[in-house]
Image (spheres, rainbow, N blue to C red):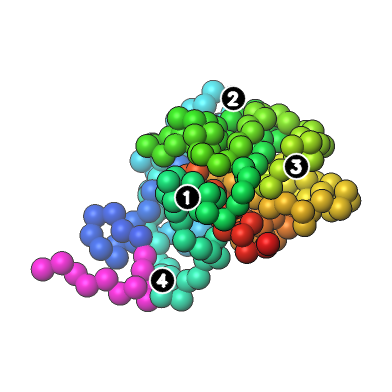
Amino acid sequence: MSQKIDLTKIKPYGDTLNDGLMQFNFTLPVPHGDEAIEAAKQLLAKMGMDEPAVVNATDLGVGYTMFVAYGKCTHTVDFTTIHVPKVEGDVMDKYGVEDFVKENFDREITIVGACTGTDAHTVGIDAIFNMKGFDGHYGLERYKGINAINMGSQVPNEELIAKAVEVNADAILVSQIVTQKDVHIHNLTNLIELLEAEGLRDKMIVACGGPRLNHEIAKELGFDAGFGPGTFAENVASFIVTQLKERE
């Protein structure tokens, strides 16, 4: 008989339920050797891990060592008390969005998107915009009733805003993949500041997405919505068209 899970006291497990076992992979700026392994074990102990064990240490060659290690977590989390802010509203599929646009608007909905700043990774914005989409979900370019404009990567915020004004966009969608030193936060903050300075912020829906973004962070930065990993075009399209209708 399987053991009943107490959701008020969940913890990681490896071999058996509630054994607390966790796997770690990290690098320390120290030369490979016994001292490096001991340093890794002490670090795990300070993180609250019982029985820390290093099972692999790789010499990276330049005074750095990478570790694979295990430890037993003694802490638990009450899963029943967790609340994560999310984008509210029903998600329609592609055809549902198309029908919604046809029934509620007598025009195309224009969405301008870009991967802004120095970020050259288009995988996120392409997944949402590209006609082929990904994982069986078509991108916005294939949606009837939606004029989807993908400006690509490394687009300055000023250029993105200018394009949105030029095409009288209903929504701006920004993808941020590169997040080192919180560059995505600075870039997204700058976009909102520019829109506010131009008196444009409330004239269009502004949303962002990326691996380290979520709805809570996006709202804190002044966006209408934030989408994390696992988002498809229909998630974004459903939010935008329903928001536009509510704001009429």
Decide which of tag 4 and tag 2 comes sooner along the chain. Answer: 2
Secondary structure found at label 3: loop
**Do the numbered discs 3 and 4 sit on residues whose CB atoms are within 8 Å?**
no
Q: Nearer the viewer, residue 178 or 146?
A: 146
On residue 82, the disc is none
* Distance (Cα) linking label 4 and label 2: 42 Å
Q: Which residue is mark 1?
A: 99
Quadrant of the rendered image containing residue 165 = top right
Q: Main secondary structure of the magenta part?
A: loop
- Whether 11 is drawn above or below 214: the answer is below
Q: Which residue is mark 2?
A: 62
Q: Position of residue 19 (x, y in %)?
A: 29, 62
- Which residue is depicted at the point 72% across and 51% down? 204
Query: Which amino acid type corresponds to the residue marked 1 in the rendered image?
Result: Asp
Q: Which residues are magenta?
A: 1-11
Q: Which residue is mark 3?
A: 168
Query: Which amino acid type corresponds to the residue marked 3 in the rendered image?
Result: Asn
Decide which of tag 1 and tag 4 comes sooner along the chain. Answer: 4
Residue furthest left as drawn: 1
Secondary structure found at label 1: helix
Residue furthest right as drawn: 197
Quadrant of the rendered image containing residue 160 = top right
- Which residue is depicted at the point 41% across and 71% down? 79
Q: Is residue 182 visible?
A: no
In this rendering, position of residue 160 left or right of residue 74: right
Badge nearest the viewer, 2 or 3: 3
- Whether 144 is drawn above or below 247: the answer is above
Residue count near mark 2 (Cα–Cα under 10 Å), binned few <14, some 14–19, many ≥20: few
